Image (tube, grey):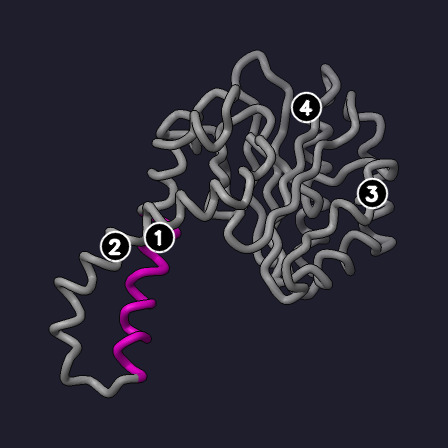
């Protein structure tokens, strides 16, 4: 499970520091994962609060969606995954008075400061829901090796099966069609499986999430 800074808001003391800011381009999409531990007996109040802050976050420019992962049996960690078009859009939300007011309302409902992870670019390919606390992204060299292991056989397959069929098309169209096939396959088919397969190496010392990790997830 995981949660993030746009819907499952951290307390005021959880504001990101400069070291938390993504190093990638400001124009890349940003995924924020926030984990909150709910105080006993505050579940209903937190659900109402969560619904309210999500509705407010959706009104901000650049907001692209929220996923809420609710606690399993005998657990009280909520994970909220929030997506913004780019980092400036995320900053506009995080510095807004509307967010500050909603954060203030949540302080009596939670037991510990929020854990916040922000991801940009390739890091989002290595994120799997289903863990009580999401791990930090793997080292860049491990992400590069895993991506190469995934993309090399795909390119071989496409070169064998697809490229000959495109030989009669203008040059600009050929790579366009190839990338339209390749990127969705990498994002929704290949990388989730590669990440699970190599979990022990990418995230040593953490439990691999189950293949049906979204059983407790609700897309909002």
- Between the residue at mark 4 and the residue at mark 3, the CA separation in whole angstroms equals 24 Å
Q: Where is residue 82 shown, x and y percent of the image? A: 61, 47
Mark with earlier residue (2, 4): 4
Secondary-structure class at tag 2: helix
- The residue singled out by tag 3 in the image is 15
- The residue singled out by tag 4 in the image is 43
- Between the residue at mark 1 and the residue at mark 4, the CA separation in whole angstroms equals 37 Å
Q: In this view, does 151 lie above or below 172?
A: above
Please provide the residue range marked out in magenta: 172-189
Mark with earlier residue (1, 4): 4
Rendered image quadrant of residue 140: top right
Q: In this view, does 202 lie above or below 31?
A: above
- Between the residue at mark 1 and the residue at mark 2, the CA separation in whole angstroms equals 9 Å
Q: Residue furthest bottom?
A: 170
Mark with earlier residue (3, 2): 3
Mark with earlier residue (1, 3): 3
- Between the residue at mark 2 and the residue at mark 4, the CA separation in whole angstroms equals 45 Å
Q: Nearer the viewer, mark 3 or mark 2?
A: 2
Quick check: marks 1 and 2 in contact, CB under 8 Å?
A: yes
Identify the mark at residue 86; answer none if there is no mark.
Answer: none
Q: Where does the N terminus fall, quadrant-wise?
A: top right
- The residue singled out by tag 2 in the image is 154
Q: Nearer the viewer, mark 2 or mark 4?
A: 2
- Between the residue at mark 1 and the residue at mark 3, the CA separation in whole angstroms equals 33 Å
Q: Nearer the viewer, mark 1 or mark 3?
A: 1
What residue appears at the point 67 percent right and 47 percent down from the top-left corner? 54
């Amino acid at each position: 499970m995981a949660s993030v800074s746009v819907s499952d808001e951290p307390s005021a003391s959880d504001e990101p520091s400069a070291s938390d800011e993504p190093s990638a381009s400001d124009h890349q999409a940003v995924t924020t994962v926030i984990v909150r531990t709910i105080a006993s007996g505050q579940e209903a109040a937190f659900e109402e609060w969560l619904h309210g802050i999500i509705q407010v976050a959706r009104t901000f420019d650049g907001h692209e969606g929220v996923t809420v992962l609710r606690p399993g049996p005998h657990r009280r960690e909520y994970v909220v995954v929030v997506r913004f078009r780019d980092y400036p859009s995320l900053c506009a939300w995080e510095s807004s008075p509307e967010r500050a007011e909603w954060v203030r309302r949540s302080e009596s409902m939670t037991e510990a400061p929020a854990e916040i992870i922000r991801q940009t670019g390739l890091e989002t390919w290595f994120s799997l829901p289903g863990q009580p606390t999401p791990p930090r992204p793997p080292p860049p060299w491990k992400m590069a090796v895993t991506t190469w292991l995934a993309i090399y056989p795909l390119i071989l397959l496409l070169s064998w099966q697809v490229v000959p069929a495109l030989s009669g098309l203008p040059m600009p169209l050929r790579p366009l069609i190839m990338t339209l096939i390749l990127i969705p396959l990498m994002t929704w088919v290949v990388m989730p499986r590669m990440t699970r397969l190599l979990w022990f190496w990418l995230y040593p010392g953490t439990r691999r999430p189950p293949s049906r990790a979204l059983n407790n997830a609700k897309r909002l």
